[in-house]
Image: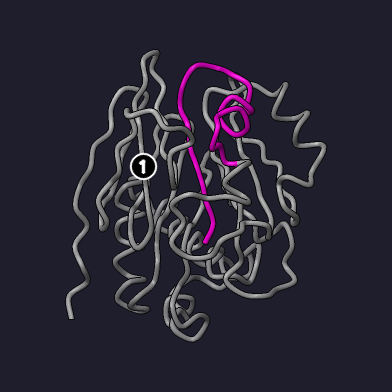
């Protein structure tokens, strides 16, 4: 369920990443090639990007399918950015949260997306939710599992954890509380991309010109794409990608 992508590189229109490639995120909304769960991502979409000299990203999100939003076509054609994160959504379950449940979620300089599902939701996650300060629970944008996953990550970030540690520790905690969860997480601050492969596909490529892309699946057939192994933490900059195995939670 869901497809997402993050990109760091030279300033370019959003459409160069999200629309123009043969199997870009736009097409993945109705015809994903490597999605293991679900077939159509029509339950909302969003894109977040960083404007020149502004560390706080902008977002554009909608509750409907990306292919039905005529305004997005214009936005993708003219808005330029050196960093973006975007997602198309296949909802875990029915809900009334609308675009509030669509990634990317945001706080400060961070953008976040979750591709997957928390197994046994919501009962399985109740103890983790109870561990958060009440003010943070009340600030949840939506009542879906992805919003809670973001709250758990954000709590660690605000406590001072590096982005990679925040994602890795959250995945381990969730996998222990809710085994069989699919926890492909994607996080950026506009300078780095951090991701986890846990139960679904994750691909990456580093291109000439200081351009790095991390995505649920390749947007074209270029052999430069590499797949991250399952149970992996990925840390990427504009010039390199580092992979670190993630440990299964102990029994």
Q: Which residue is mark 1?
A: 203
User: Does any portion of residue 140 appear in the rendered image?
Assistant: yes
Q: From this view, report whether residue 229 is shown above or below residue 18.
A: below
Whether 132 is among the magenta residues is no
Relative depth, front residue between 113 and 13 = 13
Question: Which of the 4 quarters of the picture holds residue 249?
Answer: bottom left
- Quarter the C terminus occupies: bottom left
Q: From this view, report whether residue 205 is shown above or below residue 135.
A: above
Question: Which of the 4 quarters of the picture holds residue 92?
Answer: bottom right
- Expressed as whole percent of the image width and height from the top left, the position of residue 119 reads 43, 78
Horizontally, residue 15 falls left or right of residue 206, namely right
- Expressed as whole percent of the image width and height from the top left, the position of residue 147 reads 56, 63
Horizontally, residue 177 falls left or right of residue 245, namely right
| Residue at left offset 43%, top offset 82% | 127
| Residue at left offset 41%, top offset 22% | 211
Crowd tier of the residue under label 1, counting other residues whose Cα lies within 10 Å: few below 14, some 14–19, many 20 or above:
some
Residue numbers of the magenta segment:
1-25
- Expressed as whole percent of the image width and height from the top left, the position of residue 109 reads 53, 38
Relative depth, front residue between 95 and 132 = 95
- Expressed as whole percent of the image width and height from the top left, the position of residue 141 reads 65, 62
Residue at the far right in the pictured view: 70
Residue at the far top in the pictured view: 209
Q: From this view, report whether residue 93 is shown above or below residue 220.
A: below
| Residue at left offset 35%, top offset 31% | 205
User: Does any portion of residue 106 appear in the rendered image?
Assistant: no
Whether 10 is among the magenta residues is yes
Q: From this view, report whether residue 105 is shown above or below residue 90.
A: above
Horizontally, residue 99 falls left or right of residue 218, namely right
Residue at the far bottom in the pictured view: 123
């Amino acid at each position: 369920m869901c497809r997402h992508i993050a990109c760091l590189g030279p300033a370019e229109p959003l459409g160069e990443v999200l629309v123009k490639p043969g199997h870009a995120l736009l097409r993945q909304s109705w015809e994903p090639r490597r999605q293991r769960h679900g077939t159509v991502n029509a339950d909302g979409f969003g894109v977040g990007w960083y404007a020149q000299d502004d560390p706080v990203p902008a977002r554009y999100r909608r509750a409907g399918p990306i292919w039905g939003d005529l305004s997005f076509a214009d936005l993708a054609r003219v808005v330029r950015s050196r960093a973006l994160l975007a997602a198309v959504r296949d909802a875990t379950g029915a809900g009334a949260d609308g675009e509030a449940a669509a990634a990317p979620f945001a706080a400060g300089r961070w953008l976040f997306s979750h591709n997957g599902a928390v197994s046994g939701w919501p009962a399985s996650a109740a103890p983790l939710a109870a561990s958060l300060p009440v003010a943070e629970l009340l600030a949840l944008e939506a009542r879906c599992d992805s919003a809670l996953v973001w709250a758990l990550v954000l709590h660690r970030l605000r406590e001072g954890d590096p982005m990679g540690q925040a994602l890795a520790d959250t995945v381990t905690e969730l996998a222990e509380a809710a085994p069989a969860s699919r926890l492909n997480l994607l996080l950026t601050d506009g300078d780095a991309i951090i991701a986890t492969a846990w139960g679904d596909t994750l691909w990456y490529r580093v291109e000439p010109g200081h351009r790095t892309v991390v995505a649920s699946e390749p947007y074209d057939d270029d052999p430069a794409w590499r797949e991250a192994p399952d149970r992996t933490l990925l840390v990427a900059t504009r010039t390199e990608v580092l992979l670190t195995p993630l440990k299964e939670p102990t029994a």
